[in-house]
Amino acid sequence: MEPSSRLARIQLNKATISFDDRFTLSEIDWIIEPYQHWVITGTNGSGKSALAAALAGVGKIEAGTIQGLPKNIGLVSFEAQAELIAKELKKDDADIMDVISLGTPVNEMIFEQCQDPELASELVEKFGLTKLLDRAFRKLSTGETRKVMLIRALSSKPDLLILDEPFDGLDVDTLAMLQAHLASIIDTVPMVMVLNRFDEMPDFITHIAYLDKQRLEKKRGDKKRGDSGRLAFTVDRQDEAAFNELYQLLHLKTTDLSLPEADPANKLPALDPSQPLVKLKQATIQYGDTVIVDKLDWTIEQGQHWQLSGPNGSGKTCVLSLITGDHPQCYTNDIFVFGFQRGNGESIWQIKQFIGYVSTALQWEYRVSTSCKNVIISGFYDSIGVYTKSTDHQKKIADQWLELLGMKDRADQPFNKLSYGDQRLLLIARAMVKHPPLLILDEPCLGLDDMNRQLVLALIEKICAGKETTVLYVNHHTEDKIKEIDNHLALEKNH
Amino acid sequence: MANYFNTLPLREQLAQLAKCRFMYSSEFADGVEALKGKKMVVIGCGAQGLNQGLNLRDSGLDVSYALRPEAIEQKRQSWKNATENGFVVGTYEELIPTADVVLNLTPDKQHTSVVKAVMPLMKEGACLSYSHGFNIVEEGMKIREDLTVIMVAPKCPGSEVRAEYVRGFGVPTLIAVHEANDPKGEGLALAKAYAVGTGGHKAGVLMSSFIAEVKSDLMGEQTILCGMLQTGSILCFDKMIEEGIEPGYASKLIQYGWENITEALKYGGVTNMLDRLSNPAKIKAFDLAEELKDIMRPLYNKHQDDIMSGHFSHTMMEDWANDDANLHKWRAETAETNFEKTPAADVEITEQEYFDNGILMVAMVKAGVELAFETMTAAGIIAESAYYESLHETPLIANTIARKKLYEMNATISDTAEYGCYLYNHACVPLLADFMKGIKSDVIGKGLDLDDNGVDNARLIEVNDALRAHPVEAVGSVLRGHMADMKKIV
């Protein structure tokens, strides 16, 4: 079909749109070319529906511009559906006569403003609404009103079709039918869909917009409350690698999986709950005359999540390695960790068993050629590579982690062939696999692109929400915040 | 001091040479217990000294470093190494009398003076440990009768010893007890605990004898490990230049070629290394190797004979006494070879291309490994020892050439190995002169230029059978099986 010239590019230019002062979409830059078909997706509360609605004229443009929106827009959403039902109920209320109002029949709802009665009739039949045509719209079930909404939108000859969760609540047959119909009109109308479940995404979708929730800094005199969303990134369907990553991200964000259990056969020695996990007294690291860490006192109690920050060279990694036992000067300092006063005949493996650790350096050091699954299993042994026969149970737990990461199909692929972001995710799973009392994440997002950062943060949030692991998080990206962390140690540069 | 080996009767010599056994994991169930709470004092803070010390301390053992007063006063590198890593450092007088175990990790040529200095300071019944048996076996150092003498020798450079430990693994390690010095019968328990402390038990431990270690180690390093690779590098490079191969390419093919082809050796022995070639190339490599073995056999025999008789150590010790004049001269000459001076070009060579264009190199490795193994076993060294000191270590040495050519190899290996390597090279280059005249770029530099990869069935079967029937392959597959069990990447 020859593309019609009536379609123009839709362009949002640093558009900030507010919705009842409760939610704001901030500085959205987005271009929808004619005949592109978009899915909007993102984290919960990031404004997916708001962005879709904004295209239909909802919300107040506070700054920036939205250009090229067509006049005739077909919109299907829960909000629009609720509005229509509310309107119908109002009609009922408004009736002061003592007769029972039947409300608007379905027939009228569909054909009243219809641009394409032939299509509408066809869809009525296909959706199985024929017998319901005389019934009052407000008497329909949610699914049925949704079908009516869809028929109204599809038969309005729209120049833009906005479908917010169009597949929700549809039975399998109807779903297939709708998908097929949408696929048949891709050359006549651009579509923007909001989808939470990525696996429902039709094949004809060309682009994905990913939104991300951000907390607005509260300014004095600023009356605005609540959250805002931003367009974190867009993905072209053609870009297979980016698409797969997004799939994984959504998998993590949208599935409600709990973390796989620890290996019951490898129980860690119990820690005395009255003792801190870590206690550094006047910790000092010095090379020659250069003092890297100067007389640091630091106690980490169980269950007390910490964030450690500081400029480059302030000794963040050095301090961590005093805790992990990787720094040789841990033997010259007063360090108490996991019940051990260091330097009294304990081995580093007795220390490391209590720690899960992820850092960029670890990723560089993790150069053995081994499978993704083994990388996770190596977490049981605190080793790089697996040198011990692992149990079936450990393998099963590793499989569960791969499933959680959305990487089940890559279990046997070599670790070193994976993308940087996927490697990082696996290393986080490796660190978590034994449910360590202390999880140290040394700049876990460093070097990751926006999407992978989202993935890593999503995983960390899941971990923090569980109570058995104390998280020590090191970073200097202020936007990478974990909401459960409220203790903060800032190191200064000493030299 | 007299050569200790030569003082033994033949029966005892043969018995000692035949000692080598791969130990079971279950033999290390006691962990570091035998050394727990004992004071270990390391002498020498170079790569082995420092890295072994770091591992032992991280295994929960008490480690400190005894240095000479001038090293402490002048804050030399060894002092810096030890103090920056948070170790207690003291003089011999301060630390040795407190030591339960003294770890002598100095270079071979310092052993006599070091041991003479520490022995009178050591407390009654303490243990002296070596990582190489040269001082005991070749120099005939007599150790006080109340002292236990053991050897723990990680079969990798010090940096690897540490890196593997940190990864949660270890490096293959050879242990031995000097039977003349095991008054309390605790030598083996101490050596095992020491091997556990460095992580060696995870990668496999061989129980050997001081004598088997020295005689096989010297033979391996002089011939196939360092000597053959040095001679091969020089000859192959010069031949390629003569044949008009671009020098940068030739340099790269050799520098990285040894590493690439011996990687195949590591995984599946000589058989696998040759299986990486096409059938015609395999037959070619086989024939070249047979020819090389015939030419070089007398040289290998001579090296082994000189090692057994003590002639080698005697001449080397003369050079020590002469301020290493020969060693320094030969080292300088190596730096001047065309191969060493020609930088590797920035060209892409695929892993397979190293095989296809390096048929002669494959033949040299095969000939060297098999000859060294045959010569060692013929001299009474048990097959296990001979395997480790020939085939097993070749890839490790090849890695050093890949890093920085012959310079790096000779800098990494001991002075003893380096000295022997030059001796071999000086004899082998002229020995192969005629052979090299017949060599063209089809076997080094360009690869066989064939229209058809067809071969005669009978000949191929013959070659494959011969490859697989060599005794180094039999013992190799058993030992690699043990190793694979240990380093199982499930």
Image (cartoon, coloured by chain):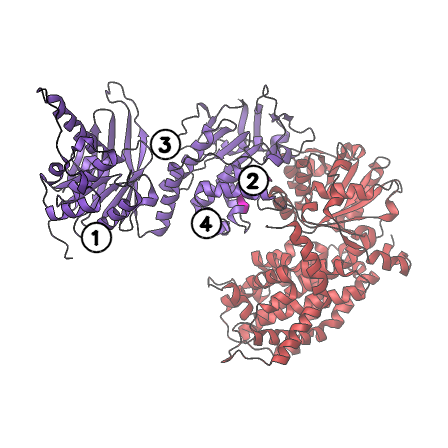
Chain colours: A purple, B red
Q: Residue at x 51, y 68 (%)?
A: B247
Label at residue A379: 2
Say if mark 1 contacts mark 4, CB within 8 Å. Answer: no
Which corner quadrant of the image does residue A349 belong to? top right
Which corner quadrant of the image does residue A486 belong to? top left
Residues indicated by labels 2 and 4 sit on the same polypeptide chain:
yes
Amino acid beneath label 1: Ser
Q: Which residue in the structure is indicated by mark 1?
A: A184
Q: Position of residue A55 (x, y in %)?
A: 18, 38
- Whether the magenta-drawn stretch holds residue B48 is answered as no
Which stretch appears magenta? Answer: A374-383
Q: Position of residue B165 (x, y in %)?
A: 63, 43
What separation in Å lies between label 1 and label 2 (alpha carbons)? 50 Å
Q: Chain of mark 1?
A: A
Q: Nearer the viewer, residue B171 or B231?
A: B171
Instruction: Say whether residue B365 is visible.
Output: yes
User: Can you say which quadrant of the picture contains the N terminus of chain A?
Assistant: bottom left
Label at residue A409: 4
Residues indicated by labels 3 and 2 sit on the same polypeptide chain:
yes
The nearer-to-camera label among 4 and 3 is 4
Q: Is A492 on the left or on the right of A34, as rendered?
A: right
Q: Which residue in the structure is indicated by mark 3?
A: A479
Q: Residue at x 14, y 57 (%)?
A: A2
Q: Chain of mark 4?
A: A
Instruction: Provide the secondary structure element on which disc 3 rests.
Output: loop
Amino acid beneath label 3: Glu
The nearer-to-camera label among 3 and 2 is 2
Residues indicated by labels 1 and 2 sit on the same polypeptide chain:
yes
